[in-house]
Amino acid sequence: MSAARGSPAPTPTSYANTPTRSVSVRGVEFVYRQLGPDHGVPLILLNHLAAVLDDWDPRVVDGLAAQRREITFDASGVGASGGSTPDTIEAMARDTVLFIKALGYDQVDLLGLSMGGFVAQVIAVREPRLVRKVVLAGTGPAGGPGIDKVTRLTIKDTLRAVLTRKDPKQYLFFPDTAVGRRAAHAFLERLKERRDGRDEAISLLVA
């Protein structure tokens, strides 16, 4: 089966105005958004650390949704989703699988960005029948070169952002060059395009 049970097909639109939905996963409400054609294998997007629905670049999501069904979601305890934040990547992977199955899918593709890539790798290993393809972006395997420095660098850049009154994503995802700063500014402006029904901001306890 390649379509979610009991889920009406959304009208293809921009991510900036795609409605936010929710599904119950073992009594916990997970919020998500979906758009794109209602056929074929869906693409599940797994986000980076401390990210919510509105941290996905709408241009990237719109581009993906032009050809296929695309789904973004808040993990347990993140944004408007209920529950508590998992302590491990393995627990995040388990929750993601439960979310996918709650939507009624028995096969998906995964796109994992940064920490989302960690989660995608665990799912692919543990649920080979569920996952058809995996795209890993800005991430790496457990124990890979530099992976042990991710947490330290994230904290460093976050503190730097607080001191300079900038968004941490400017330092985390873009080089500190003139071109990088312009690209970061354009990206951060795109994240503001959604005016209504924005997701809840990440809490300090989750981040």
Image: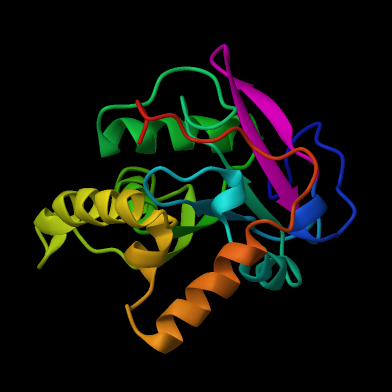
Asked if residue 80 lies left or right of residue 51, the reply is: right
Q: Which residue is depicted at the point 80% across and 61% down?
A: 14
Which residue occupies the foreground of this view, 123 or 74? 74
Asked if residue 203 lies left or right of residue 30, the reply is: left
Residue 60 found in image quarter: bottom right
Q: Is residue 65 magenta?
A: no
Asked if residue 148 lies left or right of residue 205, the reply is: left
Compared with 179, 16 (above or below) is above
Residue 2 in view, yes or no: yes
Asked if residue 11 lies left or right of residue 174, the reply is: right
Q: Which residue is depicted at the point 54% across and 19% down?
A: 82
Farthest bottom residue in view: 179
Farthest right residue in view: 11
Give residue 114's position: percent from left, percent from top.
34, 58
Q: Quarter holding the C terminus?
A: top left
Q: Which residue is depicted at the point 51% across and 79% down?
A: 183
Residue 108 in view, yes or no: no
Most common secondary structure along the magenta stretch: strand
Q: Which residues are magenta?
A: 19-35
